[in-house]
Structures are given as C-alpha cells and as structure tokens.
Amino acid sequence: MAERMTFAGLDPACIRANLDRVHERIAAAGGDPAGIEICAAVKYVAAEELPALAAGGIEIVGENRAQELLAKQAAHRDLFAWDFIGALQSRKVKDVVPNVRLIHSLASDSALAKLEANPGAEVLVQVNVAEEEGKAGIAPAELADFIARCPAPVTGLMTMPPLADRPEESRPWFAKLAELAGEHGLERLSMGTTQDFEAAVAEGATIVRLGTVLYA
C-alpha cells in the first residue's frame, strides 16, 4: 500500500501545497477545514524529516509505535502536538500516556486497566463497527460498559472500517461511529485516512489521520 512508503527529502513547500489541497477537499466534502484536525501519520517519516512537516504547516502528528514516539520526541517534541494512533499495548501505556495529548486507539481491557496508574492523556475508544473477526476494537454493544470502566477521560471514538474498493463504501461505517458517539455524548470522531477521508468528513469526522496525501 502507498502508506507503507518511506518518505525522505520532504519539501515544506510541497507539504504546504498538499495541506492546502486537503483543506479544499475537506470543504468540498461538506466539512469545515478550520474545525477538522489533520493528524499527520509519521510512522514512515524519519525523525530528521519532521522539521519539514512543521515548516509546511503540520501542527499535529500521530505515531504508531511507542519506541518511535519517544525517539522522535527526543529531538522534536516542541514542534507539534503529539498523538498516539497505533495499537496501544498495555505494557507501553506508561511510556505513551505522559507524552501525548490524545490516544486514538484504546481497544483492550488490559490497556484500560493500566490507565488508572498512568493518568494524563485523553483517550478515544477504538470501535470495531463492522464487528470483523480478529480486528482490534470494542464491539458496539460493549461500548457503554467499556467507557464506564475507563479511568481516563474518554472524549471520542475512532474506527478503521473494512477494506473497500471505493471510499463511498466506508460511509455507512463512519455514519455508525458518528451515531455511537452521539449516543454517548462524545464529540471527537477520529476516522478517515488518505484513501477515504472525504467520506469520513461527510459523515462527521473531527480528526482525519493522513499520510501519503500530505507527503507525495
């Protein structure tokens, strides 16, 4: 997949132009570019390339791996607001929580249990909206109980819909997540990536997680 490319030699001017185009596409999809946060996925961006992102206008970055998060922050902590967007392992909670503003991917009882001893970041609960077997995320029917047991502030939900040939095929799943968020009084909706962010915006996304569309 394109998102697995390694991005090197990033040009701030190119990033800014790409960011402007993303804002235009968000507006065309019915969203408010000023009100939807763009979280730049930096899993495949080397630490030395991060200043180019900041110079190009990126304000929020999301890392998938705890070790890489800490390594990149050691050099560039003050350039961005930092989010954690990867699978949250219970043994990594103590490393992740103090170093991010938001965790997008709380999805297990084991990680939830570790949050009580490691307060700090706000969390989004990852929901397996399609209830795909073997996929991370809380089942919709179990969401209320999971939120009630969470010792950290839950401010929203996140999902990754089933693989689809066309972005529009993901809209029902994004709509389902928005419905669940409304039922639980949650405002943040982290949904949509390079492949389908316009469909996510059309269904109420407040945060989109973007990679290739910003860098290529």
Image: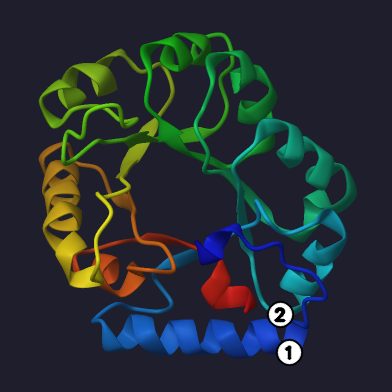
Q: Picture quarter containing residue 4?
A: bottom right
Query: What residue is at 58 percent from the left and 75 percent from the top?
Result: 214
Q: Give yes or no for contact between labels 2 and 1 (Cβ–Cβ under 8 Å).
A: yes
> Secondary structure under badge 1?
helix
7 to 94, vertically: above or below: below
Depth order, front residue of 34/129: 129
Image coordinates for residue 212, horizontal then vertical, percent: 56, 71
Depth order, front residue of 27/10: 10
108 to 64, vertically: above or below: above
* Real-space Cα separation, disc 2 to disc 1, in angstroms: 6 Å
Q: How many marks?
A: 2
Q: Which residue is mark 2?
A: 56
94 displayed left or right of 30: right
Does residue 157 appear in the picture of this structure?
A: yes
Q: Which residue is mark 1?
A: 13
Image coordinates for residue 56, horizontal then vertical, percent: 71, 79
71 displayed left or right of 56: right
Query: What residue is at 28 percent from the left and 54 percent from the top?
Result: 163
153 to 176, vertically: above or below: above
Image coordinates for residue 112, horizontal then vertical, percent: 42, 16
Image coordinates for residue 141, horizontal then vertical, percent: 10, 25
Query: What residue is at 72 percent from the left and 40 percent from the top?
Result: 69
Q: Picture quarter containing residue 152?
A: top left
